[in-house]
Amino acid sequence: MPPRVGWPTWIGVVVDDLEAQAAFYRDTLGLHEEERGEGWVQFDVDGGLFEVIERSTLPQYERPRFQVGFDVGDVEAVRAALIAGGVEPISDIEGDADADNRWCYFRDPEGNVFEITQWLRPRTRQATRTADQ
């Protein structure tokens, strides 16, 4: 039986100009910037996670594109099952016991990148926003 993945827990867009794209999603589309780090900016969209990621040489970020991350209950078991089923892995499991989540990347049959994510702790969501946002 194939592993079951949940509804996307995360949607990301890989970009060439991180600051310009972050400004677009924040200032033009009105998304609430939740957190940022080196090479990424996260936004809250009605409780969902939308991330802008700067393009790099890592296989999961090598060219501009949209990609999706699916929620799983056990990232190690689902990763093993996907590999056993012939799905191409492109990263090891990232994150550790001190992280909020653990994740890894794969390619679908047409080469599209997707992620599976196990949340170890509930994702912090921003306080209620005003009605005009």
Image (cartoon, grey):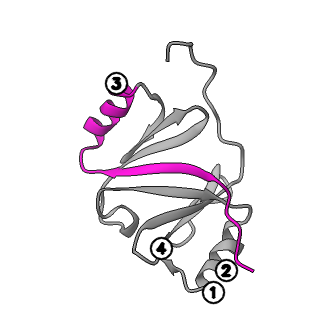
Query: Which of marks 1 and 3 precedes in the sequence?
Result: 3
Query: Which of marks 2 and 4 precedes in the sequence?
Result: 2
Between 110 and 50, which is closer to the camera in this rendering?
A: 110
Q: Which residue is found at the position 24% from the left and 50% from the top?
A: 16
Q: Is residue 52 left or right of residue 126?
A: left
Q: Which of marks 4 and 1 is in front?
A: 4
* Magenta residues, start to end: 1-29
Residue 88, given in percent of the width and then of the height, sits at 49, 80
Between 93 and 27, which is closer to the camera in this rendering?
A: 27
Q: Which residue is found at the position 63% from the left and 86% from the top?
A: 84
Q: Which residue is label 1 attached to?
A: 84
Q: Which mark is residue 81?
A: 2
Q: Residue 105 carries which label?
A: none
Say what secondary structure mark 2 lies in.
Answer: helix
Query: Which of marks 3 and 4 precedes in the sequence?
Result: 3
User: For mark 4, does the 10 Å Cα neighbourhood hold few (<14), some (14 to 19), or many (20 or more) residues?
Assistant: few
Say what secondary structure mark 1 lies in.
Answer: helix
Real-space Cα separation, disc 4 to disc 2, in angstroms: 14 Å
Real-space Cα separation, disc 4 to disc 3, in angstroms: 33 Å
The disc labelled 3 sits on which kind of residue? Asp
Q: Which residue is label 3 attached to?
A: 27
Dots 4 and 1: beta carbons under 8 Å?
Answer: no
